Amino acid sequence: MIPTPHINVSEQGVIAETVLMPGDPLRAKFIAETYLENPVQFNSVRNMFGFTGTYKGKKVSVMGSGMGMPSIGIYSYELLNFYGVKNIIRIGSCGAIQEDVKIRDIIIGMSASTTSNYASQYNLPGTYAPTASWPLMKKALTIAENKAIPVKVGNILSADIFYDDEPEVWKRWARMGVLAIEMEAAALYMNAARAGANAICILTVSDSLVSHEATSAEERQTSFTNMMEIALELA
Ligand SMILES: Nc1nc2c(nc(Br)n2[C@@H]2O[C@H](CO)[C@@H](O)[C@H]2O)c(=O)[nH]1
């Protein structure tokens, strides 16, 4: 059923089997123009830009996911179920909730706890654990090691709320060892698992709820070089 309601592509093969997904479509444009050879734009529906090009000769696509699980839930579902995408690599930003997780650190989400009800659609008789795909995790860690890029790997929280009415609620998640908060990974991991495909979430820490430090919006968009190198090599 293509084109899908949110991606205006009518042929298979226009979108690569591996798609990088930043939250911000402007960051997808920046990545395509900065890192890909011969990038071709394939989507502009609702300004959720998507591009396909090559990186070191490998075909790869990059497309914005939007903020929040409803948004990444729509785009990743269509990519995985209607466009033959096999691997989705979320590249994003997050807020640290551990003392030893500093701004600009790189985190890979081994699992994604969540406050979302996204899993309720599967009617499971228990608590599902949204988990990154091991083949992508193994390769990402090898790439990071070879490039001497330090990464922290662990449980992250995919929240539905950015401005929580109880501002200190993150401390309860921190007590459980959760490294950082973002708003997309859990839905991506569930969609990928349900589609028999692979997904991973590589994040740069752009703010800390512990130290109250934050990087500027400009820094968020352009200074994620290390994360990009891992993600592109992984693709
Ligand atoms: N809920 C939440 N999301 C965050 C935070 N820091 C960052 Br960057 N994010 C991510 O950035 C966007 C919100 O600014 C969302 O897409 C989240 O994934 C944070 O402290 N909390």
Image (spheres, rainbow, N blue to C red):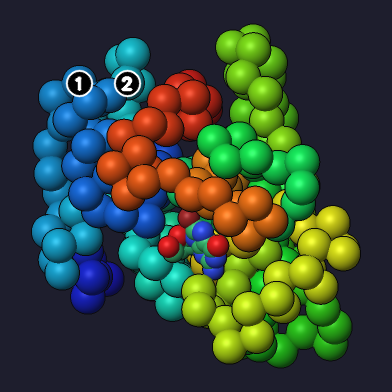
| Residue that badge 2 annotates | 55
Image point (57%, 41%), residue name:
103
Q: Say which of 228 and 200 sits in front.
A: 228
Residues at marks 1 and 2 touching, judged by CB atoms closer than 8 Å: yes
Q: Is residue 55 above or below residue 102?
A: above
Query: Which of pointers 1 and 2 lies earlier in the amino acid sequence?
Result: 1
- Residue 51 visible? The answer is no
Query: Tag 2: residue type?
Result: Tyr
| Residue that badge 1 annotates | 37
- Residue 176 visible? The answer is yes
Q: Is residue 161 above or below residue 11?
A: below
- Counting from the top left corner in percent of width and height, residue 60 is at 33, 33
Image point (61%, 35%), residue name:
105
Disc 1 versus disc 2: distance between alpha carbons? 6 Å
- Counting from the top left corner in percent of width and height, residue 80 is at 44, 58
74 horizontally vs 15: left or right = right
| Residue at disc 1, CB closer than 8 Å to ligand 1 | no
Asked where in the image residue 182 lies, by quadrant, the reply is bottom right
